[in-house]
Image (cartoon, rainbow, N blue to C red):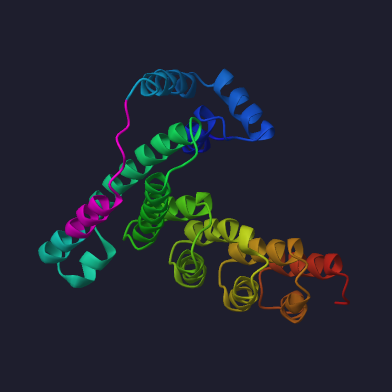
Amino acid sequence: MRCEDIAERHADYLAGRLGDHERAELQRHVAGCVACRRETESLGGVWSALRDVHVPPPDSRAMRARLDAAIAREEAATGPARGHRWSYALAAGVAVAALLGGVLIGRIGTTATPSPDVTALRDEVRDLRHMVALSLLQQQSASERLKGVSWSGQLEGPSDEIVTALIDTLRHDKNVNVRLASIDALKRFAGRDDVRNAAVEVLQTQASPLVQMALIDFVVETQDQGAADVLRQLSGDDQSDQNVRTRAAWGLEHLGVKS
């Protein structure tokens, strides 16, 4: 695990929701990383303190009203187009709210059967996380879009809108690293026809050899026989990058089709 992976899993680790393998990986990383160990110990203290905090029934309607009011203010200040995407500052604030909501939900979930109010709050937090991911994917900064792709990959039960946004990122993002990250994020949806079709389409039109090779790995990993014609074309194209041609031939071999 990397340091950013640890940060994303702290709440689940403290709530005891990680599987044995993930928990062991996190513990190994923390044992060898001073910064992550300090952060884990600090958050552990906060977590322990939360056990003694009385949690009032959540008011999900009020939470939604505050969110809608914040969006309305953003639209009034920056115009509908920019307001629709939100500013990163608003998205960051929502991310903090979502994290805190997740911590509280995790704590409540370990002590009692979730009430309708808690279930509603959990749904609100899920929706907020989706909104943050979509907001980040639309930022001007490539580093922020990378965060959006990473966030999308961590969502539980992501919506069709998230998957569509990741496909759009793969097709159109100007930054190679963002496109590469979107391929990794889309792997968990490889069973979907729209994802598989997009991978083959972009493989055929992509100009970056790095992205092409990552997509070849993707179609091989998913055993997508529909990619055979494109791989055949790439492997025999004298205008293609030599590494891509070699990888395409390798892909045909691993798909079990003739070149």
Q: Quadrant of residue 72?
A: bottom left
Residue 65 visible to the viewer: yes
Work out whether 236 lies above or below 68. Answer: below
In percent of the image, x 45 and y 22: which residue is there? 35
User: At which x and y percent is residue 203?
Assistant: 63, 73
How many numbered discs, if any?
Answer: 0
Which corner quadrant of the image does residue 52 belong to? top left
Instruction: Measuring from the top left, give residue 153's x and y in whole percent.
Output: 53, 53
Q: Quadrant of the C terminus?
A: bottom right
- Secondary structure mainly formed by the magenta segment: helix
Answer above or below: position of 170 versus 130: below
Q: With respect to residue 201, does 7 lie above or below?
A: above
Residue at horizontal 60 percent and vertical 35 percent from the top: 18
Name the quadrant of the N terminus. Answer: top right
Q: Residue furthest left?
A: 77
In this picture, which residue range is highlighted in magenta?
A: 54-70
- Residue 87 lies, in percent from the top left, at 24, 56
In this picture, is 47 found above or below 138? Answer: above
User: Quick check: 215 left or right of 229?
Assistant: left
Residue 67 within the magenta-colored segment of the rendering: yes
Q: Is residue 65 magenta?
A: yes
Front-most of 139 and 91?
91
Q: Residue at x 59, y 29 (%)?
A: 26
Q: Is residue 56 left or right of residue 78?
A: right
Is any atom of residue 88 visible in this view?
A: no
Task: List x then y, in percent, for residue 47.
Answer: 41, 23
Q: Is residue 175 left or right of 128 when viewed as pictured?
A: right
